[in-house]
Amino acid sequence: MSLSAPDLTSTGAPRLPRSSRFLGTAIIALMAYYVQLLVALAAHVAEIVALDLLFGYLRYRSGSTLLTALLSSAVNVASTIEIALIVAYS
């Protein structure tokens, strides 16, 4: 029975099998993707909360629900136009 030296990298750490390295790379790539997704989602939620606070303040100051409804509709129209332009030019 012969004993062979373990397969080590230059740093002395054991070398992982090729499939394990691929799995680790895939996991890190997916984690990076989901972090990016969560950051984008957090930015979108922050925008919605900021608009809601602004509309609430305007409703409080003006006493008009119609004003906030019209402003909300204007934001929705602007968002629709923005998405249409993004789709058209991408």
Image (cartoon, rainbow, N blue to C red):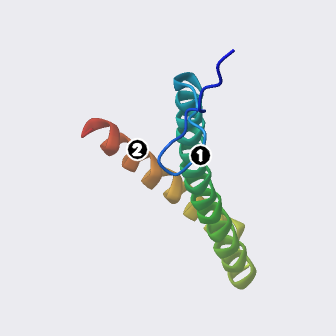
Badge number at residue 65: none
Which residue carries the number 1 mark?
A: 13
Tell me if label 2 and label 1 are in contact, CB under 8 Å.
no
Which residue carries the number 2 mark?
A: 83
Q: CA distance from mark 2 to mark 1?
A: 50 Å
The residue that appears at 40% across and 44% down in the rendered structure is 83
Which residue reaches farthest left? Answer: 89
Position in image of residue 87 (x %, y %): 33, 37
The picture quadrant where one finds residue 69 is bottom right
Name the quadrant of the C terminus.
Answer: top left
What crowding class fits label 1: few (fewer than 14 Cα within 10 Å), some (14-19), or many (20 or more)?
few
Position in image of residue 23 (x %, y %): 58, 29
* Nearer-N-terminus badge (2/1): 1
The residue that appears at 70% across and 79% down in the rendered structure is 57
The residue that appears at 52% across and 40% down in the rendered structure is 29
The residue that appears at 24% across and 40% down in the rendered structure is 89
Position in image of residue 3 (x %, y %): 65, 24
Compared with 33, 7 (above or below) is above
Position in image of residue 16 (x %, y %): 58, 32
The picture quadrant where one finds residue 15 is top right
